[in-house]
Amino acid sequence: MRILVLGGTVFVGRAVVEAALARGHEVTLFNRGRSAPQLFPRLERRPGDRERGDYRSLEGGRWDCVADVSGYVPRHLGQAMDALGDRVERYLFISSHAVYRREGLRPGATEDTPRRPPLRDAEELDGETYGPLKVACEDDLVARYGERATIVRAGKVAGPHDPSDMFTYWVRRAAWGGRVALPADPRQPVQVLDVDDLGQFVTRLLEDRRPGAFQAVGPARPTTLGGLIETCARVAGSQVELVQVQDRELPALFPLVRSNWASQLRSSARARAAGLPATPLAETAARVLAWDRARGLPALSHGFTEEQERSALEAAAQPRLNSDPAWSQPGAPTASSASTASPSPASQRAPCRDHSKSRSVRRPPR
Ligand SMILES: NC(=O)c1ccc[n+]([C@@H]2O[C@H](COP(=O)([O-])OP(=O)(O)OC[C@H]3O[C@@H](n4cnc5c(N)ncnc54)[C@H](OP(=O)(O)O)[C@@H]3O)[C@@H](O)[C@H]2O)c1
């Protein structure tokens, strides 16, 4: 197949391109050429800018399908659809689970969950507008392409090259071992999807010409935040002791901590039936750990700073939580115990980027 990827060079789109190439498809990239311009040197590139509405490079050519990874507002999709018209057979749009309304949900919600009202008169992305703007994008796509439209509503995605640092924080923190400050109930459910599973799923949907919406969430086996950290520790061969700390003065968007996640658990049944792979969480963690070490453990943008974690641990009552099996991965061996493992020397850690304080120390990779 000839696949046009709008985006394709950062994280999700990159995985889509890699999966499509691995399946022998021909890929054309449309982007500004700013993010990782050295990637995929053999692929055809069509330069353009969605913010400026510049799609001139798409004027000629035909594709079997387009994978739109970089559309966030209805104007992005409208202009891309105007530019492409019927020169693409299928239009697949990467949407988000943020399209769904948040209230009154039960775990295991399906694609039929009511969505939030569409938003059309805004272009600024924030926690309130992101989901409704994606709703409007979905609606406009289906209105134009009908059965030739495919929508993938991704949950939280994890893997190498993730610019959000959300999963990477816990992979790195668990690898350091010792007492880990957790500003959440370790039994909080969490869903993270391996980015390669998402890339392969998108390719499969295109090959099978599947219409409709699919929510892509993972891993296949249910887990909790405590279980996720333990899995990461097990992969790194470290010992962790989780210490639940108060969430006072919690940095914004703390990695994978969500008070409402229990009600926001989505069913992956439809996507699995359509071919969504199920990479075990431990494999995702191992790839992220290797990638993070290979790139030299740069400062992260989210999570506790070293100082914040130390003071949170000092303030905590320090209950031992590891002996509670309820939040461990079902069937998974417990990597840590209520051990007295010493924390890594604080001076050798650099868990995250702190915009107020400079932190550049790094623990050498193990
Ligand atoms: N990460 C998650 O957990 C998660 C969860 C749910 C949904 N999603 C969805 O996944 C998608 C994001 O994936 P990604 O950023 O990793 O995708 P990506 O396709 O790997 O990277 C973004 C691409 O968009 C291009 N781009 C950015 N601004 C552009 C512009 N103005 N004009 C043309 N191209 C532009 C970038 O290249 P240039 O910079 O060179 O232009 C880059 O190739 C979004 O649709 C998001 O809603 C992600």
Image: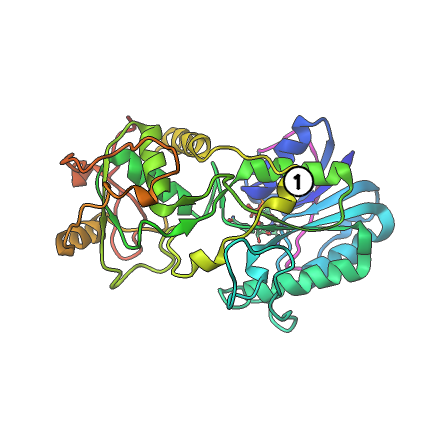
The picture places residue 27, in percent across and down from the top left corner, at 72, 35
Is 319 rendered above or below residue 2?
Answer: below
Q: Is residue 83 left or right of residue 298?
A: right
Q: Element at badge 1? A: helix
Q: Residue furthest right?
A: 86
Q: In the rendered view, would you say 327 is above or below 332?
A: below
Identify residue for label 1.
273
Q: Residue at x 14, y 54 (%)?
A: 317
Give x and y (percent) for residue 161. Answer: 48, 38
The reply to whether residue 152 is in sight is: yes
Q: Residue at x 74, y 55 (%)?
A: 80
Overall secondary structure of the magenta stretch? loop
Say whether residue 299 is visible: no
User: Based on the displayed image, in which of its 4 quarters is residue 241 positioned?
Assistant: top left
Q: Residues within 10 Å of mark 1 (few under 14, many from 20)?
A: few
Quadrant (top left/top right/bottom left/bottom right) for the N terminus = top right
Report the amino acid beneath label 1.
Answer: Ala
- Which image quarter is the C terminus in? top left
Residue depicted at x 57% and y 36%: 197
Q: Is residue 348 left or right of residue 235?
A: left
| Residue 82 shown in magenta | no
Q: For this view, does 60 lie left or right of residue 316?
A: right
Q: Nearer the viewer, residue 3 or 338?
A: 338
User: How many numbered circles are shown?
Assistant: 1
19 vs 194, nearest the viewer: 194
Q: Which residues are magenta?
A: 39-52
Residue 41 in magenta stretch? yes
